[in-house]
Image: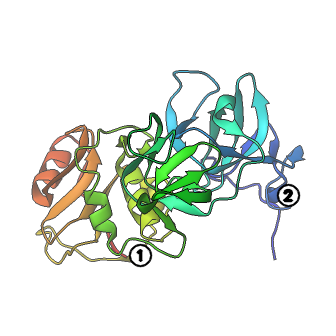
Amino acid sequence: MTHMSDEPFDKRVTPFKDGVTDQAHEGLVRARSYVVGEVLSCYDASAPILAQPEQGAEQWDQLLLGERFKVIERKHDFYWGQALRDGYVGYVPVSAFRADWYLPTHYVSTLRTYVFAGPNLKSSILSALSLNALVSVTRYENGYAYINDMGWVFANHLSAFDTFADDFVAVAESYINAPYQWGGRESIGLDCSGLLQQALYASGYGCPRDSDMQMKLGLPLMIGADLQGLQRGDLVFWKGHVAIMVDDSHIIHANAHHMKVAIEPLSEAVSRIDGCGSGRPTAFRRL
């Protein structure tokens, strides 16, 4: 049974603005108008999901190539709507999309790969795709896969949706030294929650976008001030931040101190973050 809600809802993942929402929320969210949104595919290697319909606005999230976006409204050169992979709501440039795109058959399973003009490594490079980008393979030649009328990708850099990484921490480690990018999910730059999300996606698991949402993953751990009892793959949360344990005493995280993805002792990170006034860890979780 469902009921019409007047309670506050999370606007990050609920497309509601000026009394308008997606038709899927009819009967759940009280609105003036319910819109049947058009689903489009991101055709850029990455595209920003912005807080406002203007260049230079804060980036909240990103779309990667092939990810779907449900358009609720157009404002000038921006669509407002919801990303269908992680549910985030915001504005995306109209130029990032094409209609009637191929359904994905594979995803990029290496950190980054090139799209070549021809099926050989000496061809000119047309684009570079990030881990977890979604593509449709239409034919193979010379060890390369032709994708979406775009060009050729080295076939071994793609995987079908029944094959995933065995160790999400190892995936996270492949991002070492990638620059910190607020709201980023791409291989050339991402933030703390983006790192966890992309590592889990590549391992066949769903994952929400922000660290407070991710704090609901797995099971809680009772860890004392001595920080003992943690193991590889455990998650450490602060207010507005998440890190992944790489062993019993070190974390990997995209962070604004190093301004990149880095591995460091958990104890040092705890002391530094607490010293900056952000407090000690608020939760520990095991997947």
Considering the image in quadrants, where does the N terminus appear?
bottom right
Image location of residue 169, percent across then percent down: 29, 66
Image location of residue 87, percent across then percent down: 62, 54
Residue 123 vs residue 153, the one in the foreground: 123
On the question of residue 143 being in view, the answer is: yes
Position of 185 relative to 265 (above/below): above
Residue 172 vs residue 207, the one in the foreground: 172
| Residue drawn 44% across the image and 48% down it | 130
For residue 276, which quarter of the picture? top left
Which residue is disc 2 drawn over? 26
Image location of residue 85, percent across then percent down: 60, 57
Q: Amino acid at mark 2?
A: Glu
Q: Which coloring applies here? A: rainbow
Q: Amino acid at mark 1?
A: Gly
Left or right: residue 137 compared with residue 116: right
Residue 161 vs residue 284, the one in the foreground: 161
Image mark count: 2
Image location of residue 148, percent across then percent down: 64, 49
On the question of residue 282 being in view, the answer is: no
What mark, if any, has residue 218 been given in the picture?
A: 1
Left or right: residue 57 compared with residue 75: left
SS category of the residue bearing label 1: loop
| Residue drawn 37% across the image and 76% down it | 287
SS category of the residue bearing label 2: loop
| Residue drawn 38% across the image and 71% down it | 165
| Residue drawn 22% across the image and 44% down it | 177
Position of 32 relative to 108 (above/below): above
Looking at marks 1 and 2 on the same chain, the residue that comes earlier in the sequence is marked by 2
Q: Residues within 10 Å of mark 2 (few under 14, many from 20)?
A: some
